[in-house]
Image (cartoon, helix red, strand yellow):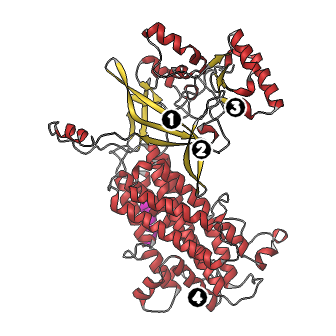
């Protein structure tokens, strides 16, 4: 954010002044106030800070002119004129179409050349076109564009790229390859770094190598001919020892927000997987014929699945004219979709994809073994998507494997992550999501009073899906009773899955968050979590298990859980508003037309 002619980073403790920005964006996207008005990237007001000299940018704005393909044919002459020497490496033959003779050559030899614009119109668009890959009509259209604006185009000779073996679709295939080297300034000159970046094409037929077209990049190491691996260590040991205290800094808001959602999506994946596995096992063990009765335990469990995962309409009750009889005849198609349809909000695959995105945005937070677990989990789940729809046991097995990987992911983090702001915020997200899930699952399991056998089956499924059945039996040594189930799930402070235990942990994490002011005894977040904690203390499982004689529903329980759920959602929203909001809205004063 720009404020008072300086650039500031939003952290969870407030604003932190920025002195240097490492620029990766194209110039035009860096400041939507003065450059590209419709851009959602960049920092509004950055140009004004640069003009004031209050921030340094590497690479500086405007430096991309050096990559202008129109300069390439003039590099040999520039080297002789400025340095009085020839280029160290030979140049690719290039013709700038801004000169009549070169323009004539390019338009007459389009199929044999690679045509490049001197700059890209938009990020992600092609700046290089292989003339040999174009149809006759496309060649005519390209010739028309070049003749209309010849200064914007260059033609380059089509050289033969090297190829390297690439692992694609479980086999070795050849791909065109190019190498990008890097130079570092030192004193009055530059030296070439030993290594660089290798880029390969996206397909065997593709000649143009570009990340925008699906190419991939890999770091490239150059091995020394002699063993010099001790030299750098010796040089470091020669330096006099200096004690450096741990580098502690406030967590940037973007990092904190992604860690928060890593915690939330982790729990969504785990709980959704458990619930779906439990219900699938129940369907397989049931002797009920299809179609299922709307009053059967199995159908009620399918309704709970839809409500708890928010994968509507699914099995939830809806208007009679919209009823889908196919769901009753064969619910497995819908359950498979809730498992594997990545584009369906609330599905297991959708939550897994969201978790993956959040994890990759804070990639420097995870240990090496954590990445091994994540990559193996991704590969296993992609294989699971190919399981035949009728192989339900294999589906359940794939869910078991996914859950095992998720707990390995959590275990790696517990063992390797420092207990600082990042861990606290990630675990805060986990505890909030666990609390919300518990309130929803209990609310929908006890939707209304059922006959004794159905009520017992629903309670058993609730306890199995939350991994609480063994704990219940060990704690109470009794058959399933609703008041005792509610006591364990809501009030038992010695049980890590109980709502009371989770709320106490949330309260501790909220207390460790930075405060905007030390004058107020309580923040709004602390007031919210104290209200939740107080509500849990003031009601018992026996009172919540009472059935309303008129509606035959658990009115007190529903009101209590709805209140808790609303307060928990409000808490999560306030955390985001307080610590993750990145900037205030900036007003557009004028626009600049950069189109050519």
Mark nearer the N terminus (3 vs 2): 3
Mark nearer the N terminus (3 vs 4): 3
State how far apart marks 3 and 4 are (Cα): 69 Å
Q: Is residue 355 left or right of residue 141?
A: left
Q: Is residue 97 left or right of residue 21?
A: right
Residue 326: which disc?
none
Q: Secondary structure at mark 3?
A: strand
Question: In the displayed structure, would residue 303 be above or below residue 230?
Answer: below
| Magenta residues, dominant SS class | helix
State how far apart marks 1 and 2 are (Cα): 13 Å
* 112 vs 57, nearest the viewer: 112
Q: Position of residue 167 (x, y in %)?
A: 56, 52
Q: Secondary structure at mark 2?
A: strand
Chain part drawn in magenta:
529-536
Residue 539 visible? The answer is no
State how far apart marks 4 and 1 are (Cα): 66 Å
Quarter of the figure that contains the C terminus = top right
- Outermost residue toward the left in this view: 240
State how far apart marks 3 and 2 are (Cα): 16 Å
Residue bearing mark 1: 179
Q: Position of residue 102 (x, y in %)?
A: 69, 13
Contact? badges 4 and 2 (CB < 8 Å): no
Residue bearing mark 4: 456
Residue 130: which disc?
3
Q: Is residue 338 left or right of residue 415?
A: right
Residue 107 painted magenta:
no
Contact? badges 1 and 3 (CB < 8 Å): no
Residue 530 painted magenta:
yes
Residue bearing mark 2: 175
Q: Position of residue 225 (x, y in %)?
A: 33, 39
């Amino acid at each position: 954010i720009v404020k008072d002619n300086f650039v500031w980073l939003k952290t969870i403790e407030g604003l932190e002044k920025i002195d240097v920005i490492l620029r990766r964006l194209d110039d035009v996207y860096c400041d939507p106030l003065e450059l590209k008005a419709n851009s959602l990237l960049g920092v509004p007001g950055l140009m004004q800070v640069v003009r004031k000299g209050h921030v340094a940018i590497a690479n500086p704005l405007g430096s991309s002119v050096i990559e202008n393909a129109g300069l390439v044919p003039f590099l040999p002459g520039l080297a002789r004129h400025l340095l009085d020497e020839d280029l160290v490496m030979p140049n690719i033959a290039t013709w700038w179409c801004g000169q009549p003779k070169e323009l004539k050559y390019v338009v007459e030899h389009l199929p044999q050349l690679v045509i490049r614009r001197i700059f890209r119109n938009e990020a992600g668009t092609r700046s290089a076109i292989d003339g040999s890959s174009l149809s006759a009509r496309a060649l005519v259209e390209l010739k028309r564009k070049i003749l209309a604006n010849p200064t914007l185009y260059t033609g380059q000779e089509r050289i033969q790229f090297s190829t390297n073996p690439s692992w694609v679709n479980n086999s070795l295939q050849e791909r065109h390859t190019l190498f990008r080297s890097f130079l570092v300034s030192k004193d009055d000159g530059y030296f070439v770094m030993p290594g660089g970046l290798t880029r390969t094409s996206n397909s065997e037929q593709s000649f143009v190598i570009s990340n925008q077209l699906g190419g991939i990049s890999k770091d490239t190491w150059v091995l020394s001919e002699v063993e010099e691996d001790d030299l750098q260590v010796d040089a470091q040991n020669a330096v006099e020892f200096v004690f450096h205290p741990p580098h502690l800094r406030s967590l940037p808001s973007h990092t904190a927000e992604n860690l928060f959602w890593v915690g939330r999506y982790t729990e969504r994946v785990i709980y959704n997987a458990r619930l779906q596995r439990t219900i699938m096992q129940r369907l397989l063990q049931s002797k009920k014929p299809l179609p299922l009765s709307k009053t059967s335990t199995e159908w009620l469990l399918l309704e709970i699945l839809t409500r708890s995962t928010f994968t509507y309409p699914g099995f939830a009750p809806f208007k009679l004219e919209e009823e889908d009889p196919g769901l009753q005849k064969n619910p497995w198609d819908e359950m498979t979709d809730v498992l594997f349809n990545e584009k369906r909000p609330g599905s297991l695959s959708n939550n897994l994809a969201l978790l993956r995105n959040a994890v990759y945005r804070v990639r420097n937070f995870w240990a090496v073994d954590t990445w091994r677990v994540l990559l193996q989990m991704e590969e296993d789940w992609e294989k699971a998507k190919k399981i035949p729809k009728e192989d339900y046991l294999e589906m359940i097995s794939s869910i078991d494997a996914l859950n095992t990987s998720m707990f390995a992911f959590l275990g790696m983090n517990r063992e390797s992550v420092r207990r600082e702001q990042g861990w606290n915020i990630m675990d805060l997200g986990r505890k909030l999501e666990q609390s919300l899930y518990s309130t929803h699952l209990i609310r929908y399991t006890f939707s209304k009073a059922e006959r004794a056998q159905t009520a017992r089956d629903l309670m058993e499924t609730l306890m199995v899906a939350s991994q609480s059945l063994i704990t219940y039996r060990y704690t109470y040594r009794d058959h399933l009773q609703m008041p005792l189930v509610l006591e364990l799930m809501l009030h038992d402070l010695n049980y890590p899955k109980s709502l009371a235990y989770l709320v106490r942990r949330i309260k501790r994490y909220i207390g460790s968050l930075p405060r905007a002011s030390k004058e107020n005894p309580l923040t709004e977040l602390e007031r919210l979590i104290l209200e939740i904690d107080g509500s849990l203390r003031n009601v018992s499982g026996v009172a919540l298990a009472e059935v309303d004689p008129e509606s035959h529903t658990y009115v007190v329980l529903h009101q209590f859980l709805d209140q808790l759920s609303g307060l928990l959602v409000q808490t999560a929203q306030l955390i985001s508003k307080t610590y993750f909001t990145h900037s205030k809205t900036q007003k557009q004063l004028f626009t600049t037309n950069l189109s050519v």
